[in-house]
Image: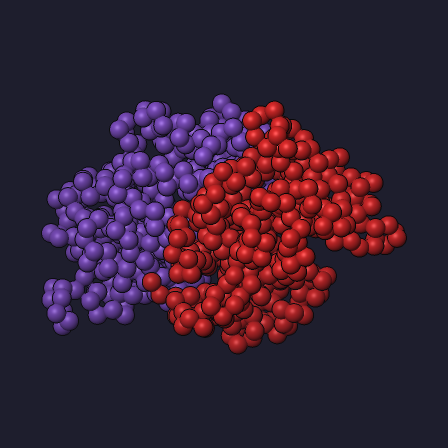
Chain colours: A red, B purple
Amino acid sequence: MENGHGGSKHRVAVIGSGNWGSVASRLLASNTAKLPSFYDEVRMWVFEETLPTGEKLSECINRANENCKYLPGIKLGTNVIADPDLESAVKDADMLVFVTPHQFVEGICKKLVGKLRPGVQAISLIKGMEVKMEGPCMISKLISDTLGINCCVLMGANIANEIAVEKFSEATIGYREDKEAASRWAKLFTTPYFLVSVVEDIEGVELCGTLKNIVAIAAGLVDGLDMGNNTKAAIMRIGLREMRAFSKLLFPSVRDNTFFESCGVADLITTCLGGRNRRVAEAFARNGGKRSFDELEAEMLHGQKLQGVSTAREVYEVLTYRGWQELFPLLSTVHEICIGQLPPTSIVEYKYWRD
Amino acid sequence: MENGHGGSKHRVAVIGSGNWGSVASRLLASNTAKLPSFYDEVRMWVFEETLPTGEKLSECINRANENCKYLPGIKLGTNVIADPDLESAVKDADMLVFVTPHQFVEGICKKLVGKLRPGVQAISLIKGMEVKMEGPCMISKLISDTLGINCCVLMGANIANEIAVEKFSEATIGYREDKEAASRWAKLFTTPYFLVSVVEDIEGVELCGTLKNIVAIAAGLVDGLDMGNNTKAAIMRIGLREMRAFSKLLFPSVRDNTFFESCGVADLITTCLGGRNRRVAEAFARNGGKRSFDELEAEMLHGQKLQGVSTAREVYEVLTYRGWQELFPLLSTVHEICIGQLPPTSIVEYKYWRD
């Protein structure tokens, strides 16, 4: 495993092959092909499915060098190899990239217990959390605890399709203690069009990526109410402030500076400008709250789920359990609007805010 | 001057009657009419002009209770009195609101020397600065120094026409030492649809309002290059970071928290979503930089000037004089693009950024 550069040579596997997983594999493969400290091959675990043509998704990816279903038209790099067998995909890797829907993480990790190489490092690109009564369990912690490995996170203003066509973008890696591992991940992800910063604040980075979806719901409501840019900017600012305050209450180690990184203000902006949470919330407000989020989601997203609505519910549970609702009027109000307890217009009722 | 509430009763005058000046007068007048510690009347100094109908602007305002030219269709409140005579407009006031184009401030202040009541307080709603070799002289300082009075600032995501129709919005008041004066201003400006926060960081607040116009030029260039939301969010974030770093280098007292206020991130968002700096910069990039900002400005803005271009030039002078150009690649690059030294695409050339 020694290479000619005085260090060990690393092998990367990606767990997940959706839209973002495919773009991430492409990004990583462009670097592993160039950098001597990594093996060229990037193995990508594919949750197998049969395409309408009858071909298997993994076969199609390996034949066409494209994710025919989730990222058609983009060559992944010939060193990306799709593998429908989870154990086989990860068995030689010492760097694991998790990029699946968040509800699958726990099951995947359980399958991997005892199957990984010693000293393996992980990074999570997954935005979401598991809420327990005592507070949210971040996905990186779930991975870390289940597998007994170190896990960084990568978050940022990262609309996958824009990165696929190499439009300039940034991201933030959050780590806990192991700066060397974080720097290696940064080296592996950074390209001329994809700049990566590294910060020692894993909870801050991950909570940014997760909580911003709630603010995007609020921003979408404002759009649907035709309130204009002042109001939208005000709501985004209040949202950012509550994200910061909530993160710091949960984890006193969270740093203010993290919210100035790509994972913070930039991801919030992207998500509140475009994004499906914003879009469905806009439709919800235009319908005066008379059609439920579930109904609009089914109609508009063709089976994809809105993370903002479920994250709002999860955060609300934490707020209720800890008696923090009054401290977080925006986060609370979004949930109460989502479940029909308050009308969409409540999002701009000033009585909810205080300094 | 004593009222029945144990304090002195205050009289407000507004210096300026453009679009924002008229909206501010309307906002203030709604409060002076209600609050016992203020005289009802808000006197608004009007830079007199003759309308196409032959009527004087001040006469039209007093007849119709509308600013017929700069805010037609909006009633100002019958307690707003237009006065074309500067000295007469301010002579009884002890609270002066400055809201003129920034290039007129120095001349106006010189005319007012020795003409004000003792103990008069000022607030500036003006976004801009005067650059001298040793650094920018903020407008509030110009007012303060010329007249020997205390001057706060009010900045924020405040598109005037949206506030005119009472859409929910926020603003930030920055003050130096005199918190009581700042709180009185906050009381005078706050309404159910206009929330005002107060922070002891006058330079931070004022620099936010000023520098954000440079970032709006950058955002407009990204729009004109069709780079998408990731890139735009990245540029806005880098811009915010440089605003913060530049402000802190100039004034070490500037606080990080100020950039989380309405004057910071919210105003940046509003300005980068709409606004004329963004719009003209978009046109500039679409033309590949072949038509100058001056030309596009004349064509698109009908005589209004772009603050972003001149602020970029002013900041560039400071950066050059102090040898700080490399520290502020975005602020520098915007100016170099504006003057045709670099192509519009330079705004996303990653080599300009480092961490």
From the viewer's perspective, tell me whether residue B62 is left or right of residue A124.
Answer: left
How many marks on residues? 0
Position of B90 relative to B148 (above/below): below
Position of A258 relative to A241 (above/below): above
From the viewer's perspective, tell me whether residue B335 is left or right of residue B110.
Answer: right
Name the spot of residue B50 as percent of width and height, x first.
Answer: 36, 46
Name the spot of residue A245 as percent of width and height, x first.
Answer: 40, 59
Name the spot of residue B64 as percent of width and height, x first.
Answer: 37, 61
Residue B270 visible from this viewpoint? no
Q: Give the residue drawn at x 55%, y 60%.
A: A129
The N terminus of chain A lies in quadrant: top right
Which quadrant of the view contains residue A128? bottom right
Towards the viewer: B240 or B103 = B240
Position of B343 relative to A66 (above/below): above
Q: Give the residue drawn at x 83%, y 53%.
A: A51
Name the spot of residue B324 as percent of width and height, x first.
Answer: 36, 28
Towards the viewer: A242 or B259 = A242
The C terminus of chain A lies in quadrant: bottom left
From the viewer's perspective, tell me whether residue A344 is left or right of residue A78.
Answer: left
Q: Give the residue drawn at x 47%, y 56%.
A: A236
Q: Give the residue drawn at x 27%, y 36%.
A: B137
Towards the viewer: A312 or B77 = A312
Seen from this angle, which residue lies furthest bottom? A341
Seen from this angle, which residue lies furthest right? A54
Which quadrant of the view contains residue A41? top right
